[in-house]
Image: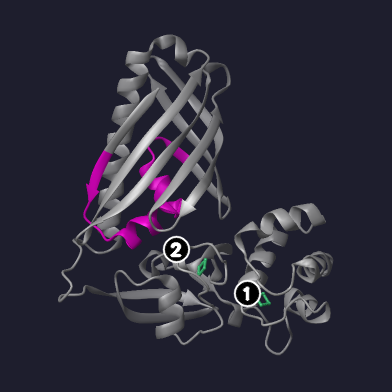
Amino acid sequence: MDMSNSQRIDAPRAVVWAAINDAEMLKKCIPGCEEIEKLSDTEMAAKVVLKVGPVKATFKGKVTFANVVAPEALTLVGEGSGGIAGHAKGSADVKLEEDGEATILTYQVKAQIGGKIAQLGSRLIDSTAQKLAKEFFSRFETELAETIGGLTPSPDEMRMTQLTLHINGREVTDEVETRTLLVEFLRNQQRLTGTHVGCDTSQCGACVVHVDGVAVKSCAMLAVQCAGRQVTTIEGLAAGDEMHPMQQAFHEHHALQCGFCTPGMIMSAVDMVRRHDGVLDEHTVREELEGNICRCTGYENIVTAILHAAEAMAR
Ligand code: FES
Ligand code: FES
């Protein structure tokens, strides 16, 4: 099955890009999506109930983000199984182009479907896929409009909104421009400058913080998407004067040189240890650090520190 289309979305490209990378947003927009979990910067696991003609099945699968050129393009590669109902695998090339203050989103989907659903015939599958895509974009626009508080403002009429969230355990309320990225909000408005910006392509990981306990790149998320949520930055990791075991391990194993990547490394590493229940090996640590770039250390000591910290955190 091949399908392509383009859609004009009434929001700036940075906002659309952030939304595409937000698991919560995708969960609300994908028709039939029951669960979606961000496994890493480039992987999500999803559970979706699909109905094609008379066949209804729950598909479980994984979506990987490839060829990421933020905030312009990415390829979503997915594979899922619905048991005896069938299986699907495919990819979608997504491009975002600026159109004034709006964004043109173009996608090209290639998919292969097997099993019982495939026997229903390509016409039914194609029309169902078109319907699902249409529904996805209509929800996506509605959710985006709600998130940014309505229509995108003109340049001389920046829309401000009041944002309340918890940062490092403290309730914070502040006025924020709706298009402000979380990293900008933390650094410029909250003066939490431990969260760094090392790129403009969402690749370096220097900006990683935790939102509701999960590591996210704060340059790929809007501040307003954190309303009512718990944000933890590197400044909130220690318990008073006592360093977090991950910070202690980085210190003891000399896992930094210039230190620019370190806050993001540490926040990603803490999330990694939690997700693996403290059971990590060198190969896993190296794979998981894919989204964090260090230009100085050669990674050796960082990996050693994370393995030691995993043991300390387990204790
Ligand atoms: S600043 Fe966020 S990934 Fe580089
Ligand atoms: S210690 Fe310098 S970039 Fe990692």
Is 227 situated above or below 11? Answer: below
**Tag of residue 261:** 1
Residue 265 lies in what quarter of the image? bottom right
Distance in Å between CA atoms under marks 2 and 1: 17 Å
Which residue is pictured at 43% across the width and 71% down the height? 182
Which residue lies under the disc numbered 2? Answer: 220
Q: In the image, what residue type sits under mark 1?
A: Cys
Residue 229 visible? The answer is no
Q: Residue at x 41, y 35 (%)?
A: 32
* Secondary structure of residue under mark 1: loop
* Image spot of residue 99 (x, y percent): 21, 56
Q: Farthest residue toward the bottom?
A: 241
**Nearer-N-terminus badge (2/1):** 2
Say above or below: 242 vs 103: below
Q: Is residue 293 above or below residue 140?
A: below
From the top left corner, tell me how far across and down residue 219 is, in percent.
46, 68
